Amino acid sequence: MRNQPMPAYRARPPTMPPTLGELMKSPPKDYMSVRQLAFFENLLIKTKAEFLESTQAIRVGLRDDEAHADPTDCACVEEEHAMATLLCSREFHRMREIDSAINRIHNRSYGWCRDSGEPIGLGRLLACPTAVFCIQAQALHEHASNPNRTKQN
């Protein structure tokens, strides 16, 4: 198997990611610089680890539930299992989004709108690190998926 070249931003000497304060104060020309990409990669990895820990705790809880003779107790346990399963499913979906975002960091497309190619923006990425669209493109996608939505005053 042929060795794959490392992404350009990894080939450079390691740099410390900026703090949140430094990130927000960085000039526009530094948008998605090596340091900013490192900041978001660390944020995504930390978030994924939290999801994995939470999902593991839920799975252990599901395994540890004991059998209940009372039908009411059984119904409550069934409902709790259904909710836990739904939560695990959502967290696994979010982890796939995180993996996709990390891949975009590695290929240097992270932080750029998939539709317009414009910057997504640091504020939006801090709020939603897996975002793939800028605010304008996201609004268009939401409107296209729900054309019956009415304007609110």
Image (spheres, rainbow, N blue to C red):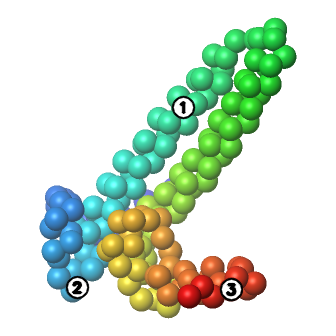
The answer to the question of whether label 2 and label 1 lie on touching residues, with beta carbons closer than 8 A, is: no
Three-letter amino acid code at the position of disc 1: Gln
The image quadrant that residue 35 belongs to is bottom left
Q: How many marks?
A: 3
Q: Position of residue 131 (x, y in %)?
A: 48, 70
Q: Provide the residue designation for mark 3.
A: 150
Q: Position of residue 14 (x, y in %)?
A: 19, 59
Left or right of residue 73: residue 113 = left
Q: Amino acid at mark 2?
A: Pro
- Secondary element under disc 3, as helix, strand or loop, is loop
Numbered tag placed on residue 28 in the rendering: 2
Helix, strand or loop status at disc 2: helix
- Name the residue rendered at 50%, 79% in the picture: 133
Residue type, mark 3 in image: Thr
Callout 2 environment at 10 Å: few (<14), some (14 to 19), or many (20+)? few
Q: Residue at x 81, y 11 (%)?
A: 70
